[in-house]
Image: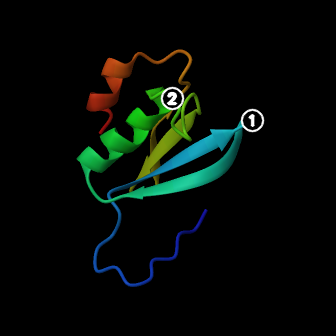
């Protein structure tokens, strides 16, 4: 999954890949640890587009964490990276 950056002076801190039916469907580019936290928190906010969706996080082209939103406790999110 190559990401082409246009018009940015910095590299992303991490990429959150959202899954739909077990398949990679959406990407969110994050430029800080706080953005990763705020982005992944959306999977727990009822009514949000990403509510209940599973995801994984890529940083420096290494998968850091997978999250099944039905099993992972929310307090683990803050210590992801």
Write the residue at 34% across / 28% down.
Answer: 77
Residue furthest to the bottom in view is 7
The numbered mark, 1 or 2, whose residue comes first in the sequence reads: 1
Which quadrant holds residue 81? top left
Query: Foreground: 62 or 19?
Result: 19
Q: Coloured how?
A: rainbow
Frontmost residue, 62 versus 50: 50
Vertical side of 45 occupied by 50: above or below: below
30 lies above or below 64: below
Mark 2 burial class by Cα count in 10 Å: few <14, some 14-19, many 20+: some
Dot 1, crowdedness within 10 Å: few (<14), some or many (≥20)? few
Return the x and y of residue 58 as percentages of the image width and height.
Answer: 45, 49
SS class of the residue under badge 1? loop
Who's the residue at 33% across and 34% down the image? 80
Is 37 above or below relative to 78?
A: below
Taking the image as shown, residue 77 lies to the left or right of residue 68, namely left
Question: Residue 10: percent from the left, percent from the top?
Answer: 28, 74
Instruction: Classify residue 10 as left or right of residue 69.
Output: left
Mark 2 = which residue? 67
């Amino acid at each position: 999954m190559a990401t082409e950056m246009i018009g940015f002076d910095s590299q992303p801190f991490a990429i959150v890949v959202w899954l739909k039916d077990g398949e990679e469907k959406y990407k969110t580019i994050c430029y800080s640890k706080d953005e990763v936290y705020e982005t992944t928190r959306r999977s727990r906010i009822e009514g949000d587009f990403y509510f209940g969706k599973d995801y994984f996080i890529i940083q420096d082209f290494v998968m850091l964490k997978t999250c099944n939103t039905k099993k992972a406790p929310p307090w683990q999110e803050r210590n992801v990276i």
